[in-house]
Amino acid sequence: MTPIATETRHPQTQGLQTLPGAAVLSLALEGQIAALNAVRPALPALEQAAIAAAQALAQGGKLAYAGAGSSGLMALADCLELSGTFGIPPDRTPMLFAGGAAALLHMTGAVEDDLSLAEADFARAGLGEGDVAICVSASGTTPYTLAIARMCKTTGATVVGLAHVPDSALLTLADVPVCLKTGPEIVAGSTRLGAATAQKAALNLISVLVGIRLGHVQDGYMVNLVADNAKLIGRAARIVAALSGQPVERAQEALAATAGAVKPAVLVAAGAAPGQAHDLLTASGGHLGPALERLRK
């Protein structure tokens, strides 16, 4: 049987264990850089994935993530950030991770083969028509991830598949296939290395475009953040001040008047009453830029 690309030996690793430490690290770094470069050809597919995800969320649907092992960890890292960065409620972004929370403390390979776990997780997530699931598997053949993708197709949810092997089962099944051709790892089969780096970068790109399309980013600022600690409270005040052109003190007053919500606080700091700020944002579909333009006319 011909091994898949993610399992084959890297051509430069003969005698790897005999090399000086600096040479090993240099080779490892080159592998990371090559993995990131592998993301660029996938940009059109990543844009398509982001548009589908943003549309699902804008219409009240869910954006789910699914994966096992290292691929699941990359998916989880992106999933967990959506609430704090873009203010998207966690119940709208379910994570389906093989083995659940217990597997985060002690990862075992067996859970990725357990289809009953996939069935239970899928039922709990409640995915269906109008939802999107980003399914991540380095080989494109992980049983847990494939099972989630197949169940999504059955219920009408859109599948975004991220994998590193062309024509793999996941990419063939996906509505939006994203192939990241990272090739062999410097430790054969250890896809926590280059493959995971490419996955994390690709997921970052998807989610940042989702946030922008939903209107949660204005001029590079996260205007729908959830300010739930001292650092973020300070950040929110600086964002409001910068976008409204008012002093930080005025920004803090505006945030107090909007219960900490950044978008309406920008409008209040710029001269709107809280009720007017709400109406302006409703009229603009939650996008701050058009609401500011209407206020300033």
Image: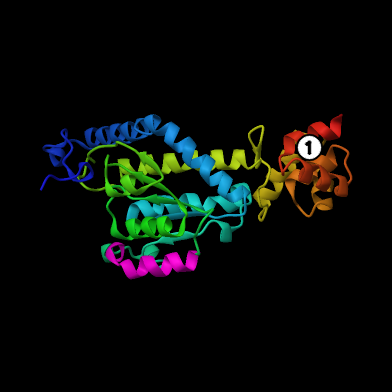
- The reply to whether residue 296 is visible in this rendering is yes
Tell me if residue 53 is in the magenta stretch: no
Q: Is residue 122 above or below residue 163?
A: below
Number of on-image labels: 1
- Using residue 59 as the reference point, say whether residue 7 is left or right of it: left
Residue 40 occupies quadrant? top left
SS for callout 1: helix
- The reply to whether residue 99 is visible in this rendering is no
The structure residue drawn at horizontal position 68% and vertical position 52%, both measured from the top left corner, is 227
Which residue occupies the foreground of this view, 68 or 108? 68
Residue 65 in the image: state x and y as whole percent. Answer: 45, 54
The structure residue drawn at horizontal position 16% and vertical position 33%, both measured from the top left corner, is 12
Q: Residues within 10 Å of mark 1 (few under 14, many from 20)?
A: many
> If the image is split into quadrants, where does the C terminus sit?
top right
Color style of the picture: rainbow
- Using residue 243 as the reference point, say whether residue 193 is left or right of it: left
Residue 90 in the image: state x and y as whole percent. Answer: 57, 59
Q: Is residue 269 above or below residue 34?
A: below
Q: Which residue is mark 1?
A: 291
Q: Is residue 38 above or below residue 6?
A: above
- In the image, the segment drawn in magenta is 111-125
Residue 133 in the image: state x and y as whole percent. Answer: 46, 52
Tell me if residue 121 is in the magenta stretch: yes
The structure residue drawn at horizontal position 15% and vertical position 45%, both measured from the top left corner, is 3
Residue 263 in the image: state x and y as whole percent. Answer: 74, 44
The structure residue drawn at horizontal position 47% and vertical position 54%, both measured from the top left corner, is 157
